[in-house]
Amino acid sequence: MDSTFNWKLEQTLLEKVINLASQRGQSPESIVSEAVRLYLETQLLETVDNAVSDPLIGLFAGTPDLATNSEDILQQEITEKSGWTWK
C-alpha cells in the first residue's frame, strides 16, 4: 500500500483550517487529522447502527397497510363464530 497521499484542500477550507489551528495553537495538519478521524468514527457508528436490526421488526405477522386498512382487514376476517358469545 502506497502511503503517499496527494491532496490539495480548497482555498476557503484551507484558510478556515489555518485560522482554527492558529486559534488552538495547533498545526493545520493536526486539525485536518482530527476532522478526518471524527468523520470516520461517525461513519463507522452509522454503519454499525444500520447493521443492527430492531428485534421487534417482523415479530408480528401483518400486512404493511394495516394502519390504513384496519377496518377492511377486520371485516374480511369476521366469521360466523367471531366475537363474544354468551355461555
Image (spheres, rainbow, N blue to C red):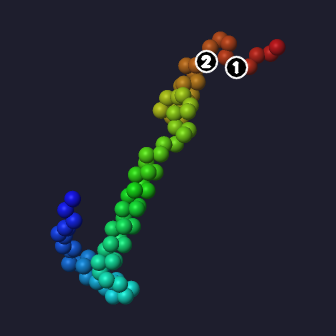
Identify residue for label 1.
83
Quadrant into which the N terminus falls: bottom left
Above or below residue 75? Residue 8 is below
Q: Position of residue 43 (x, y in %)?
A: 38, 58
Q: Quadrant of residue 84?
A: top right
What residue is rendered at 19% in x and 62% in y? 2
Q: Position of residue 15 (x, y in %)?
A: 25, 82
Q: Is residue 28 left or right of residue 45?
A: left
Nearer to me, 81 or 60: 60
Q: Are marks 2 and 1 in contact (CB under 8 Å)?
A: yes
Distance between the alpha carbons at the discs numbered 2 and 1 = 8 Å
Q: Is residue 25 left or right of residue 60?
A: left
Identify residue for label 2.
78
What residue is rendered at 49% in x and 29% in y? 63
Judging from the image, what secondary structure is the residue with disc 1 in?
Answer: loop
Above or below residue 41? Residue 18 is below
